[in-house]
């Protein structure tokens, strides 16, 4: 995909032919290389890490940050930013759980046949996501409010709405049919892991193989040129907000199934993890550059680190420091990649 | 319309007369502020709601401020409230050290300060009403020992302790009490993992990973029933059935009680919230009037509670409830949402 042109970098040493192709290929996939090295190290040094079940856990637990990262990547590639995704996810989870919960705070919706709760709640959650996306798009595209400020405001407002929704109460007691999404395995692999992979594949296809995807890159890279070429720049930007919010709502729907309910602080901190995954994955915060395959590797890397910390024997007070240090190491390696590219390619 | 000074004066007198004839105004004793640490879980919002109901009975108006788990914000709230000169301030501290300068300022301004649910030991307070998180941790430890003995025939086994936020004083204190009991039994091994910001998905993931790395885990002790649903979700996803792994929580949250009813969780050690709240209401008049509180044993909602004079002031310790399947529906548990219909009377 589009890569920053570094031909004017002073002191750059050119590389030609086959060796250049090899180095470019390695650099393009360096996050996967980092992931491989780190997971190998964890397998060697952390007892209990090297087992298939742990690898499935890594993918399964990457579901929510992963889907958020896809939406965030779309917004960033389109030259925007969406800080509201975490709150949208939490509100969608709360709405889903409240709708069908048989607990004290639930509305106990139980259609006949009961499997209808799956499409029913999904439709409600995605509609909520679309509405949030439209509001963000209106604020940014129509009212021309800075995307960072506008989505920060919706982030705060929606998180408040999650807390206010049930007066600070947690909702639990979801029907088994909805829970089945989180507990079912296909071919021995958790359904959530399949869904995560599917989301990445589908949106990778959209970004790289469809005109809409190409427009996202063009608009994010330089909105003036596509505007002059007759591309509806504002509509593309608006769609990027709607897509990121709908994906966040989908993540929320899955999160409700996974945790068998919803709490006001559900998903707290996932926005920052999504940002870390997107940056590690090579998406430029300036817009117009990045690939979802890299983001997927970034998400898996964070999930692998989190799992390693879960298995390490260390005082609980230090786990966040270790997590931060490992994420920083991964990002430094990524920065090294950019440096190598600038100097030698 | 020609409004004269006499008309305005007449209207003002009429308004004062109307207000004075209102019984609530006549009996009003003033405002009390309740500074809660957060509204993320139901415990503090419910405490505040029940406290407002009890204080209304004795003529006080309660205003609640939520610190959203930020100790600096809570300190700012306290500074602002001092300027409003309330009759008393009730504090459930986000951080028991960070709040101390604000408490000292309130005391200097002559405003009584009451600690609720979270002990503040580094300054003098007018009253403290706590279950004693340390004590709840100890009870959870005793229950763990009992459950393991019943399951394995001996006091041994592997326990996964899922804390709350590692910086939260509630979780730290609970963990200390639990550790006191566990260290006496070296044949019980305890794996402790944190849940930053009490985020349930993290607790679920911790359980999921630990069950793979340590398939011989016998019992999971999560510090709040708030995390129960996510942890049970992971047990279910791992193919476990209710009762395969013993579970208990350390706050008696509705989420934990729901899992007791569903058979996944065996025990919850609940904070006696209604009694804690009532204790404050029953001594408030004395505190506001700067009358001394007499140490001794008192019955609060049928719970034998001890009022002792400590270095940080009068301290009312109310024992925690052990919730099991046998008593899960008892209205005494705050998580059941049945506020006791009691008349607030002075405790002494």
Image (tube, rainbow, N blue to C red):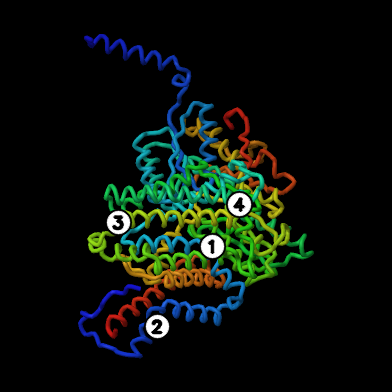
Q: Marks 4 and 2: which is nearer the front?
A: 2
Q: Position of residue A146 (x, y in %)?
A: 28, 53
Q: Chain of mark 1?
A: B
Residues at marks 4 and 2, CA–CA distance in whole angstroms: 48 Å
> Which image quarter is the N terminus of chain A in?
bottom left
Q: Are marks 3 and 1 in contact (CB under 8 Å)?
A: no
Q: Marks 1 and 2: which is nearer the front?
A: 2
Label 4: how many Cα within 10 Å (few below 14, some 14–19, many 20+): many
Residue wearing tag 2? A26
Q: Position of residue B346 (x, y in %)?
A: 57, 29
Residue wearing tag 4? B225
Q: Is residue A322 left or right of residue B298?
A: left
Looking at the image, is A145 positioned above or below residue B234?
Answer: above
Mark 4 and mark 3 on one chain: no
Q: Are marks 2 and 3 in contact (CB under 8 Å)?
A: no
**Labels 1 and 4: the sequence-earlier one:** 1
Residue wearing tag 3? A232
Q: Residue at x 77, y 65 (%)?
A: B154
Mark 4 and mark 2 on one chain: no
């Amino acid at each position: 995909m589009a890569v920053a042109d570094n031909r004017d970098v002073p002191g750059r040493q050119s590389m030609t032919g086959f060796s250049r192709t090899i180095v470019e290929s390695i650099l393009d996939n360096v996050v996967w290389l980092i992931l491989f090295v780190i997971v190998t190290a964890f397998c060697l040094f952390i007892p209990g890490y090297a087992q298939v079940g742990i690898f499935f856990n890594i993918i399964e637990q990457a579901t929510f940050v992963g889907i958020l990262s896809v939406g965030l990547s779309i917004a960033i590639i389109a030259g925007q930013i969406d800080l509201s995704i975490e709150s949208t996810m939490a509100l969608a989870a709360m709405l889903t759980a409240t709708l069908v919960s048989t607990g004290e705070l639930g509305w106990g919706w139980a259609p006949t046949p009961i499997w209808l709760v799956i499409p029913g709640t999904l439709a409600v959650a995605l509609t909520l996501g679309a509405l949030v996306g439209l509001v963000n798009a209106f604020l940014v595209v129509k009212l021309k409010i800075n995307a960072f400020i506008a989505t920060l405001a919706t982030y705060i407002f929606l998180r408040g709405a999650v807390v206010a929704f049930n007066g600070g109460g947690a909702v639990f007691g979801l029907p088994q049919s909805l829970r089945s999404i989180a507990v079912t395995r296909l071919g021995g692999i958790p359904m959530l892991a399949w869904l995560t992979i599917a989301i990445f594949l589908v949106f990778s296809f959209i970004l790289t193989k469809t005109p809409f995807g190409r427009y996202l890159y063009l608009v994010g890279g330089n909105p003036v040129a596509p505007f002059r070429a007759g591309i509806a720049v504002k509509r593309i930007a608006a769609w990027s907000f709607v897509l990121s919010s709908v994906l966040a709502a989908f993540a929320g729907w899955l999160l409700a199934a996974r945790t068998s309910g919803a709490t006001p602080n559900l998903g707290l901190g996932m926005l920052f993890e999504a940002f870390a995954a997107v940056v590690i994955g090579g998406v430029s915060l300036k817009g117009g550059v990045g690939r979802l395959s890299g983001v997927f590797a970034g998400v898996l890397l964070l999930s692998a680190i989190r799992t390693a910390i879960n298995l390490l024997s260390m005082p609980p007070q230090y786990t966040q420091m270790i997590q931060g240090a490992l994420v920083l190491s991964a990002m430094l390696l990524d920065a090294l990649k950019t440096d190598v590219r600038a100097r030698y390619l | 319309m020609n409004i004269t000074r006499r008309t305005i004066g007449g209207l003002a007198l009429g308004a004062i007369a109307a207000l004075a004839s209102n019984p609530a105004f006549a009996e009003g004793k003033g405002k009390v502020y309740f500074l809660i640490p957060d509204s993320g879980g139901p415990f503090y919002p419910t405490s505040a709601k029940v406290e407002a109901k009890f204080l209304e009975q004795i003529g006080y108006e309660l205003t609640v401020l939520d610190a959203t788990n930020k100790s600096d914000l809570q300190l700012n709230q306290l500074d602002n409230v001092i300027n409003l000169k309330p009759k008393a301030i009730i504090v459930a501290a986000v951080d028991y050290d960070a709040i101390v300068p604000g408490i000292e300022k309130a005391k200097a301004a002559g405003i009584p300060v009451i600690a609720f649910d979270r002990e503040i030991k580094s300054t003098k307070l007018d009253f403290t009403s706590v279950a004693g998180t340390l004590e709840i941790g100890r009870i959870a430890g005793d229950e763990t020992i009992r459950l393991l003995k019943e399951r394995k025939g001996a006091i041994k086994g592997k326990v996964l302790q899922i804390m709350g936020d590692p910086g939260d004083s509630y979780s730290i204190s609970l963990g200390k009490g639990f550790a006191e009991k566990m260290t006496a039994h070296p044949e019980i091994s305890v794996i402790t993992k944190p849940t930053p910001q009490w985020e349930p998905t993290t607790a679920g993931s911790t359980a999921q990973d630990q069950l793979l790395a340590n398939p011989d885990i016998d019992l999971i002790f999560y510090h709040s029933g708030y995390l129960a649903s996510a942890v049970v979700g992971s047990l279910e996803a791992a193919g476990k059935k209710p009762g395969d792994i013993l579970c208990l929580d350390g706050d008696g949250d509705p989420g934990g009680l729901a899992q007791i009813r569903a058979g996944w969780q065996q025990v919850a050690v609940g904070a006696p919230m209604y009694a804690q709240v009532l204790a404050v209401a029953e001594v408030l008049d004395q505190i506001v009037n700067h009358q001394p509180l007499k140490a001794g044993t008192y019955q609060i909602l049928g719970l034998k509670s001890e009022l002792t004079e400590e270095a940080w002031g009068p301290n009312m310790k109310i024992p925690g409830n052990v919730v099991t399947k046998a008593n899960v529906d008892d209205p005494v548990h705050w998580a059941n949402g049945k506020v006791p219909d009691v008349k607030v009377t002075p405790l002494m």
